[in-house]
Amino acid sequence: MRISIQVMKSPSFQDISSVLRIAEAAINRGHEVSLILLHDAVHAIVKTPGGIQKNLKELMSKGVRVYAYGSLLESEGVSKDILSGVVPMDPTMLPSLISESDRFINFMM
C-alpha cells in the first residue's frame, strides 16, 4: 500500500512526532511511505543539533521518501543545510503524489 502523509506544522509540535511514528509503523509493515512537508514543517529537514533529523534519516534509509516544497525552503530560509535525499517539489507534484497514494493522511491543524 502506498501511503502519503502531509504535514504543515513546525517540528516543535507533536504532529511531526506522530507522523514519524506512523511512517515507521507503515514502513515496518512493508508499505511505501512518502512524507510531504509544507509551511513550517520544512524546518524538520534542516540539520540542527538535537533535531529530529536522525529519525528522518533512519526512515529515509528504510525507504521513506521525503518531499518539501522548494519555494518554501527558500522563503523559510532553510534551503541550505537540508538533509541529503530530500526531494524539493513544486506545487504541480502534489496532485500526483495524492492520486498515486492508496491512503493520504493530512496533518493540517
Image (spheres, rainbow, N blue to C red):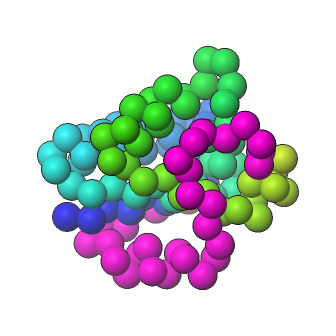
Please tell me which residue is depicted at 43% across the width and 73% down the height of the picture: 97
Point out the image quarter for the N terminus. Answer: bottom left
Q: Is residue 54 left or right of residue 21?
A: right
Return the x and y of residue 87 as percentages of the image width and height: 56, 58
Please tell me which residue is depicted at 60% across the width and 39% down the height of the picture: 83
Query: Of 107 and 85, which appears nearest the observer?
Result: 85
Residue 11, picture quadrant: top right
Residue 85 located within the stretch drawn in magenta: yes
Residue 87 located within the stretch drawn in magenta: yes
Please tell me which residue is depicted at 39% across the width and 32% down the height of the picture: 58
Residue at the left extreme? 29
* Span highlighted in magenta in the image: 78-107
Return the x and y of residue 38 as percentages of the image width and height: 63, 58
Q: Is residue 109 visible?
A: no
Please tell me which residue is depicted at 65% across the width and 72% down the height of the picture: 90
Q: Is residue 15 visible?
A: yes
Instruction: Give above or below for 4 relative to 47.
Output: below
